[in-house]
Image (cartoon, rainbow, N blue to C red):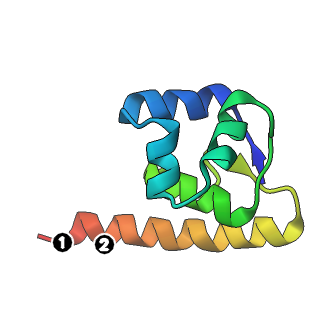
């Protein structure tokens, strides 16, 4: 999965008030993985890592990362459908 924008990831951290270490702990991921994405040392990661980060920030699958393979595209599409259904259920509940 390719990070769409390092700056957007940094802004998500700032808006959430989370540090890199806190994001890594909550996700759960290694601090080095998060740091490498934030600093630009790495611009891609596994599908699992991308999903974990997007879940922490409660953004739809594919918002922060774009699929690099057809398999990732299919997975993101399925995850997005599931994410959207969850959001619609939240709106309907009293």
Of the pair 86 and 1, the residue shown nearer to us: 1
Answer whether labels 1 and 2 touch (C-beta < 8 Å). yes
Q: Residue 53 in the image: x percent, y percent?
A: 56, 53
Q: In which quarter of the image is the N terminus?
A: bottom right
Q: Which residue is drawn at 41% across and 37% down?
A: 18
Q: Residue 89 in the image: x percent, y percent?
A: 31, 72
How far apart are labels 1 and 2 at the CA level? 6 Å
Say which quarter of the image contains residue 16: top left
Q: Which residue is drawn at 69% across and 48% down?
A: 65
- Residue on which disc 1 sits: 93
Q: From where the camera sits, is residue 60 visible? A: no
Of the pair 23 and 56, the residue shown nearer to us: 23
Q: Residue 94 in the image: x percent, y percent?
A: 11, 70
Helix, strand or loop status at disc 1: loop
Q: From where the camera sits, is residue 62 visible? A: yes
Q: Residues within 10 Å of mark 2 (few under 14, many from 20)?
A: few
Task: Give the number of the disc on residue 58.
Answer: none
Q: Which residue is drawn at 56% across and 29% down?
A: 10
- Residue on which disc 2 sits: 89
Q: Residue at x 51, y 27 (%)?
A: 11
Q: Residues within 10 Å of mark 1 (few under 14, many from 20)?
A: few
């Amino acid at each position: 999965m390719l990070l769409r924008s390092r700056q957007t990831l940094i802004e998500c951290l700032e808006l959430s008030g989370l540090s890199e270490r806190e994001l890594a702990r909550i996700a759960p991921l290694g601090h080095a993985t998060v740091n490498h994405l934030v600093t630009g040392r790495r611009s891609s990661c596994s599908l699992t890592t991308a999903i974990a980060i997007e879940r922490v920030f409660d953004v739809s699958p594919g918002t922060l990362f774009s699929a690099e393979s057809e398999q990732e595209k299919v997975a993101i599409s399925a995850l997005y459908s599931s994410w959207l259904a969850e959001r619609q259920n939240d709106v309907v509940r009293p």
